[in-house]
């Protein structure tokens, strides 16, 4: 899948979900990862110290089953493959 198509189809809906929940896109992504199972340990990186607290707050976000389904429908396994997505 070409990068522009991935960005055009995936990013806006995920940004919309983050806005609905009043969280940052990074918090949404980290929270979603934390909801994937007890064997998943996201390791976020940051260049800014203020992002450390922001990222940590993702652990307090409870995603409903409906929200998880919406994200899972957008981020199907195998959808984003390749050397880079940026």
Image: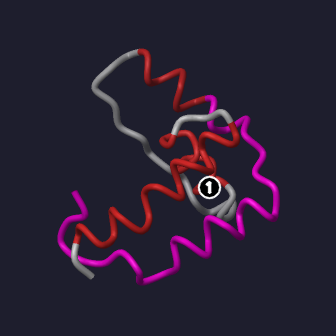
Name the residue: 35% across, 64% down.
8
Furthest toward the left, the residue is: 83
**Left or right of 6 in this view: 75:** right
Does 49 sit above or below residue 45?
above
Name the residue: 70% across, 40% down.
21
Name the residue: 52% across, 32% down.
55
Q: Which residues are magenta?
A: 57-86
| Quadrant (top left/top right/bottom left/bottom right) for the C terminus | bottom left
Q: Residues within 10 Å of mark 1 (few under 14, many from 20)?
A: many
**Left or right of 55 in this view: 23:** right
Residue under label 1: 32
40 or 3: nearer the viewer: 3
Does 58 sit above or below residue 76?
above
Element type at mark 1: helix
| Quadrant (top left/top right/bottom left/bottom right) for the N terminus | bottom left
Residue 70 locus on image (x, y percent): 67, 67
Furthest toward the right, the residue is: 65
Name the residue: 71% across, 70% down.
69
Say how the picture is coloured.
secondary structure
Furthest toward the top, the residue is: 50
Residue 52 locus on image (x, y percent): 46, 24
Residue 5, magenta (yes or no): no
**Left or right of 13 in this view: 58:** right
Residue 47 locus on image (x, y percent): 28, 26
78 or 9: nearer the viewer: 9
């Amino acid at each position: 899948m070409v990068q522009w198509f991935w960005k055009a189809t995936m990013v806006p809906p995920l940004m919309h979900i983050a806005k609905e929940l009043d969280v940052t896109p990074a918090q949404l992504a980290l929270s979603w990862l934390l909801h994937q199972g007890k064997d998943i340990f996201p390791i976020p990186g940051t260049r800014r110290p203020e992002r450390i607290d922001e990222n940590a707050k993702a652990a307090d976000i409870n995603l409903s089953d409906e929200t998880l389904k919406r994200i899972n429908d957008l981020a199907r396994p195998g959808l984003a493959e390749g050397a880079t997505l940026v």
